[in-house]
Amino acid sequence: PPAGPGGGGASAAGDDCGALVLFDQLFSVAPVRTARAELHVEVVDDAKQLRRGYARLPLSDLADQLKHRLDLPISRPGVPAGGRPASLRVEVQFQYSKVVPIQKRIFELMDEQRKLHRDVTNLQIGKELEFEDDWDLPDKRDLADAETKADGDDGDDGKDS
């Protein structure tokens, strides 16, 4: 059910979409053994005992295990072609392994460490940095700040002579 004040959702008038019904629901799904499965969401009018529509989302679309905000098109049986389209906005995350996101972050950090070691070695032997654009070096910031100040100062102090 739509959540009311103090806990979830409310009805609101959309710009040109008609009325919107907002839900603030959290669902946890039982463990899924395969990424080839689909998340199937049904929209049901409890008062009239009618199935208003459904949306599907393949779990393979969420294989990166990150949170996604998606607008899923709602299929509405019995609505004539050309009827007003409906969608379901969801925030979803499919977490099939706690190791995968941690492992990905470790690899990113190891790559950054490798670049740092390489540039430190290059500095020690007098070579140019290979990954200079990757680092937020203080002298680069100071140079950028100085250029910004120079661009803003055209030498005119605002006084007429």
Image: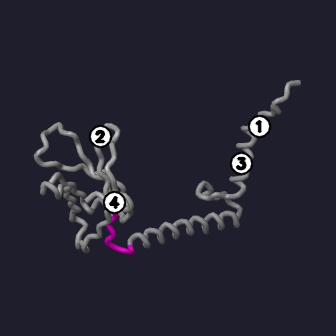
| Mark 3 and mark 1 residues within 8 Å of each other at the beta carbon | no
Sequence-first tag of 3 and 4 = 4
What residue is at 77 percent from the left and 37 percent from the top? 153
Looking at the image, residue 64 lies above or below residue 152: below
> Looking at this view, is 55 or 100 the one in front?
55
Q: Are marks 2 and 3 in contact (CB under 8 Å)?
A: no
| Residue under pointer 4 | 24
Q: Give above or below for 83 relative to 119.
A: above
- Rounded to the nearest angstrom, the CA distance separating label 1 from label 4 is 52 Å
Q: Secondary structure at mark 4?
A: loop
Magenta segment boundaries in residue numbering: 91-99
Q: Residues within 10 Å of mark 2 (few under 14, many from 20)?
A: few
Q: Which residue is mark 1?
A: 153
Callout in the foreground (2, 3): 2
Report which residue position mark 3 lands on.
Answer: 145
Q: Quadrant of residue 139?
A: bottom right
Query: Which residue has dot 2 on it?
Result: 17
Q: Are marks 1 and 2 in contact (CB under 8 Å)?
A: no
Q: Earlier in the sequence, mark 1 or mark 4?
A: 4
Q: Quadrant of the N terminus?
A: bottom left
Amino acid type at mark 3: Asp
Q: What amino acid does circle 4 point to? A: Asp
Which one is earlier in the sequence, the residue at label 2 or at label 4?
2
